[in-house]
Image (cartoon, rainbow, N blue to C red):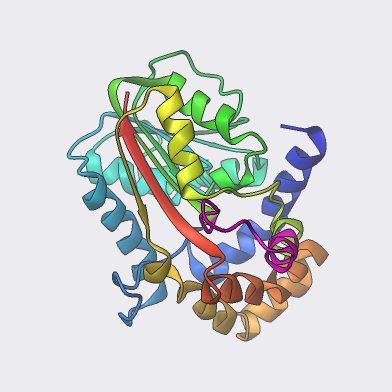
Amino acid sequence: MSPTLYEQIQQFYDASSSLWEQVWGEHMHHGYYGADGTQKKERRQAQIDLIEEVIRWTGVQQAENILDVGCGIGGSSLYLAGRFNARTTGITLSPVQAARATKRASEFGLSARSHFQVADAQAMPFTDNSFDLVWSLESGEHMPDKSKFLQECYRVLKPGGTLIMVTWCHRPIDNLPLTADEEKHLAEIYRVYCLPYVISLPQYEVIARELGLQNIRSADWSKAVAPFWDVVIDSTFSPMAIWGLLCSGWGTIQAALSLGLMSRGYERGLIRFGLLCGNK
């Protein structure tokens, strides 16, 4: 990962994570609003429901040693540690996130089973065949080399283990290339959210097959999560959110002002929410 992009991502999450936690809680990912996106539910419950729906979809019944790639402040890691009575390791580029996740693990009495550290997902500090479940929930979009990222996830996965990746994508381009206007829309999203680029779900499937991942499954849950961004937009109008934005710096303010980019991206079918799983 280039030093500039690494630093941009680190600084973005160092600055914004505490505000997100104050307004939204520990889960820094989309919510699930039913298969067609019409279910009304409390926003944090929707995020927990997403984790549960992903687990159900993949069919994972147990896991003893889990890697959470792009762990944020430990939301998924700690949930999965309790859900599976497992050991979890979370990695993030943000020292602020790693420190907060470590503190939260202590608060939940999970320090002995949940560890967090700063690490690059494209050069993980773990030996081959270390984890029986590699979980990546909305971190793949930040990776500048998608093949290298999945290769690293595959490398640290134990034989027979499961890789679960959920990530932002753009629409498939097999039959119709991205238009100039779509490229412009994506470029604005990349700039605001520190993304190098995103690819389509079919392109991820090709990479997974080339790695040798077995039992590959994929799904597009764009409809199920699309309401999330409008809910986020509504939440920014609270006094606490407005004050937090003013205190968190221009990068976070810019991201908040640009929330509509994602909402419109889903509306026009450009942004897709992709799931991929398979076994080593």
Residue 16 point in image, percent of width and height: 67, 60
With 251 as the anchor, is 119 left or right in this view? left
- 160 above or below 25? above
With 267 as the anchor, is 276 left or right in this view? left
**Which residue is rendered at x = 37% and y = 31% of the image?**
112
Residue 96 point in image, percent of width and height: 65, 46
Q: Which residues are magenta?
A: 170-187
**Which residue is rendered at x = 58% and y = 41% of the image?**
98
- 102 above or below 89? below
Q: Quadrant of the N terminus?
A: top right
Is residue 137 visible from the viewing direction of this image?
A: no
Count all numbered tags in the image, as a single digit: 0
**Which residue is rendered at x = 78% and y = 62% of the image?**
251
- Front-most of residues 133 and 169: 169
Whether the magenta-drawn stretch holds residue 174 is answered as yes
Residue 200 point in image, percent of width and height: 52, 50
Q: Farthest residue toward the front?
A: 175
Whether the magenta-drawn stretch holds residue 67 is answered as no
- Front-most of residues 13 and 132: 132
**Which residue is rendered at x = 44% and y = 13% of the image?**
128
Q: Quadrant of the C terminus?
A: top left
Residue 189 point in image, percent of width and height: 69, 62
- 106 above or below 266? above
Is residue 120 visible from the viewing direction of this image?
A: yes
